[in-house]
Amino acid sequence: MSNSSETKPNAGKFLIFSLLGIFLFLTPIPDGEGAFNIFLGMIIGWINGFFNPAGGFLGIEGLDFRHWIVLAIITVSFCGTVAAQWLKPSFIMNNPRLKNTFVVSPLYFATRIIAFAIVLMLITGNGPDSVIAAWTGDVMIDVVAGIAVIFIVLPLGLPFLTEFGFMEFLGTLVRKVVRVLFTLPGRASVDLLASWFGSSAASIVITTGQLDKGYYTRREAAVSATNFATVSIPFTLVVVNTIGLDGHFFTFYAVMGITVLILAMIMPRIWPLRGITNTYVEDVGKQIQENEDTGGSLFSAAVTSATKKANAVNSKTFVSSIKDGYLSLLLDLVPIILAWGTLALMVHELTDVLDWISQPMGWYLNIFQVPDAFAYAPATLVGFMDMFIPALLLGNAPINTQFILGVLSIVQLIYLAETGALIIKSKIPLGVGKLFAIFMIRTIIAIPIIVVLTSFLFNP
């Protein structure tokens, strides 16, 4: 059989399913209200609206069916972990996926216990006020409910973007530019697009999947996860509206985008990312040849690389990819986000710890003449716990402070309750300490950049 006869069906497979992935994740669609979303984002919005309508699910006022979904997910995660730790049933211990999901470290075991206790308190309405109050657990279960819907929908579409050659195609086309600017293989551009039009979780899932399959080295995965996993356009709009900057979205997003790209050029070249070993996961090894010369045009090389990838996909690998997504996203992350997010809000609301430790950031903001620097300095740190918390703190701030710290909350990127949890759970060699260091370095570098851009572009 000749090459042409082999290539045509492969090229069709690559083209059809990759276009479907592009449509699902990367195509901005007008939402009819002056904003843009992606198709999966619209599906997620419809599901959220169906299960949590303004009048309550099934007409029952105050009933949010998504909360029961969160309860079910956390209960399965908790019970499976308890069974794996103490009973060790064969159906878990002999299944690599289930074993990896339910056999966890003591920290994650404790996290799932805490999450199970919190969700029971929130569903029943019985528990300490500090846990079930409107400004702690009640906020977090709504946040987690929305994230759970995202995690239910995301794995269904993600294989179209990652398994049928689109990353190989785009990576080959832009590899030189991306390598020079960001020290990454060209395929990392898909991570950026997936997060900007989809979600930061989508970007991290793509990155960790590429590391596990031998397409990223540990350093490349770390760089991508901590620089390209930006908050999506739709979620940025939610943050802007929450802060009260509704009429300044495009300026806000322009300042955010420029800052993210500048940071992505700086961060890989300094500690701690620079010092991470450029090695592949041992049990899979290197599975990519981005620099091979096919002797033809760059476009031909891109198509060849993509068709090879598409040819390797079958129904079994496709379904396997979806299963991996559900186990890693739902049963691993939903408990982490609820437990850590609730505890973070409790620390902020019930103690003065953040006011005390944010004093140096107040001095730093004051250097750049940010209005009410000390009053809103905690907003520069609480984002490490959850990216939405700063938006909740900035509602009464001066408008320039709202703008500067609002943009900062997006470009910090490392949020323990979501992206941080995904990174820690993965094989990327970044623990909490290094993630916090990256978070602080990004914060310190970003503030003067944002202040300068704001002075030129923002006209309140």
Image: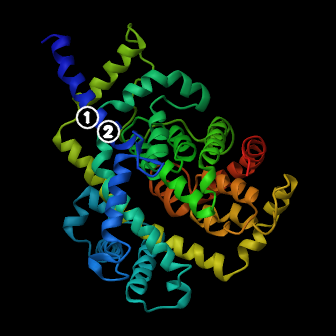
Badge 2 marks a residue whose secondary structure is helix
Residue 106 seen by the camera: no
* Relative horizontal placement of residue 454, taking residue 97 as reference (left or right): right
Please provide percent x and percent y for residue 338. 46, 72
The residue at the point 41 percent across, 80 percent down is 119
Location of residue 337 with respect to 456 vertically, above or below = below
> Which amino acid type corresponds to the residue marked 2 in the rendered image?
Gly
Residue 312 vs residue 219, the one in the foreground: 312
Q: Nearer the viewer, residue 91 or 455?
A: 455
**Mark 1 closeness class: few <14, some 14–19, many ≥20 residues within 10 Å:** some
User: Pointer 1: what residue?
Assistant: 17
Contact between labelled residues 1 and 2, with CB atoms less than 8 Å apart: yes
Gap in Å between the C-alphas at discs 2 and 1? 6 Å
Residue type, numbered disc 1: Phe
Residue that badge 2 annotates: 21
Residue 437's x, y, as percent? 67, 54
Task: Give residue 238's position: percent from left, percent from top.
Answer: 52, 58
